[in-house]
Image: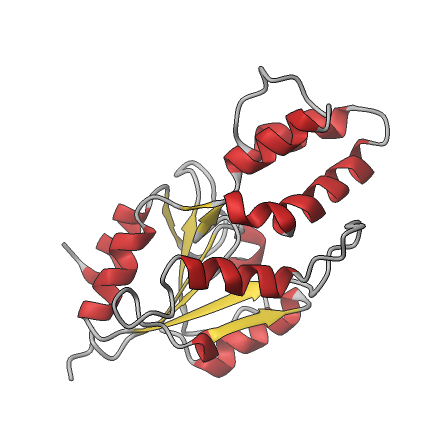
Amino acid sequence: MTRAQAMRIGIDFDNTIIGYDAVFHATATELGLIDAGVEPRKQAVRDAVRLAPHGELSWQRLQGQVYGSGMVEATMVEGVDRFLRRCRTMHCEVLIVSHKTEFGHHDPQRVNLRAAAIGWMEAHGFFSDDRYGIPVGNVFFETTRAEKLARIGRLRCDWFIDDLEDVLADPAFPPGVRRILFAPAQSAQAPCVVCPNWALIEEHVFGR
């Protein structure tokens, strides 16, 4: 087996594999938290909601709804499908590690966020032999960031891909794991490669 085939690739879930921009915008508009003219991006919605009275609480409640019952409307981030197919072709092991509590702090429906995430992955073929073939046992949900970092270390990932610089820059991030920040190219103080799209992530991991 070649070095590329032996790679263990860790990937964050929320806003790295799965995208919520349209769901956040639609839900916030329906709830009257924003005007329809707000740019349909999670960051823009968050900034607009937080400007209102009790904005932080409204934002937390919105997150609880989107990450729970609203997850069925979320979409796979562009480029993830191709990347996961290449991982399978190259016989790489994909490990999904997410900082996700079981329930949202401000979700009156008490939707199990972890079960919703597994359901979304199942619906998108993550565990299917005819799609990505990722074992469900390769999905890990951790309650705290510290637990997430410890998990990445125990899994002995060769790469880890995340949309949050704070995770990759954390002093407790396991040494020896190469880091890719999925974010606009102008950011990053962390010791990592910065890629604004999954095509570039694929290039960094596998080469052209």
Q: Give the image location of residue 205, x and y in percent.
A: 26, 61
Residue 30 versus residue 174 in the image, above or below? above
Q: Give the image location of residue 164, x and y in percent.
A: 54, 51
Look at 73% across and 23% down and name the residue there. 32
Q: Quadrant of the N terminus?
A: bottom left
Residue 185 versus residue 148 in the image, above or below? above
Q: Nearer the viewer, residue 50 or 71?
A: 71
Left or right for 150, reference 111? left
Left or right for 156, reference 45? left
Left or right for 156, reference 87? right
Look at 27% across and 74% down and name the residue there. 92
Q: Give the image location of residue 5, x and y in percent.
A: 20, 76
- Answer yes or no: is residue 99 visible: no
Residue 39 versus residue 71 in the image, above or below? above
Look at 55% across and 64% down and name the residue there. 98
Look at 49% across and 53% down and name the residue there. 190
Q: Nearer the viewer, residue 36 or 170?
A: 36
The mark total stands at: 0
Q: Quadrant of the C terminus?
A: bottom left
Q: Nearer the viewer, residue 62 or 206?
A: 62
Q: Nearer the viewer, residue 42 or 153?
A: 42
Hey, which quadrant is residue 204 in on the image? bottom left
Hey, which quadrant is residue 42 in on the image? top right
Residue 1 versus residue 130 in the image, above or below? below
Q: Give the image location of residue 68, x and y in percent.
A: 64, 52
